[in-house]
Image (cartoon, helix red, strand yellow):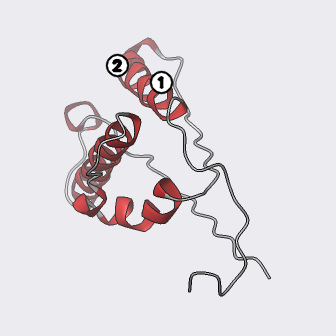
Amino acid sequence: RSVSKLHLVDLAGSERQSKAKTQGHASLEAKHINRSLAALHDVIGALAAKDKHVPFRNSKLTQLLQDSLAGQSRVLMLVTVSSDPDDAKETVASLLLAKRVRAIELGGGVKREVGESE
């Protein structure tokens, strides 16, 4: 018997605060999303550089994804972008992150039987 995990993470709402002009709970949520995205960016950078220390503990998101990003996993990242010229900065930032993610070589998705390491 094999074990599989599927993580679906939606980082929508990670717009720049000055542009989104959100207030209250929506503003707080956007700040948390941006913080998690920054931590994910740091993890991706450390993995791409093959650093000895990868800062998975910097956010709940990266802690949750640690076994998928650091193990023998297959990872698919979907990036949506806007064609609106007003969103050009966010679009470029998203595409640069996707480019960095694409360059990372993870384990390759090795099948593991339940009980082998648990």
Quadrant in which residue 79 is drawn = top right
SS label for mark 1 = helix
SS label for mark 2 = helix
- Residue under label 1: 95
Q: Left or right: 68 with respect to 34?
A: right
| Amino acid found under the numbered disc labelled 1 | Leu
Picture residue at 50% right of the left edge, 36% below the top:
104
Picture residue at 43% right of the left edge, 12% below the top:
85
> Measured along the vertical axis of the image, is residue 84 above or below residue 5?
above
The residue furthest top is 85
Picture residue at 73% right of the left edge, 65% below the top:
111
**Quarter of the picture holding the C terminus:** bottom right
Of residues 36 and 20, the one nearer the viewer is 36
Residue 16's spot in the image, x, y percent? Answer: 26, 34
- Residue under label 2: 89
**Quarter of the picture holding the N terminus:** bottom right
> Measured along the vertical axis of the image, is residue 99 above or below residue 26?
above
Q: Earlier in the sequence, mark 2 or mark 1?
A: 2
Q: Left or right: 64 with respect to 37?
A: right
Quadrant in which residue 32 is drawn = bottom left
Q: Left or right: 105 with respect to 28?
A: right
Residue 47's spot in the image, x, y percent? Answer: 39, 42
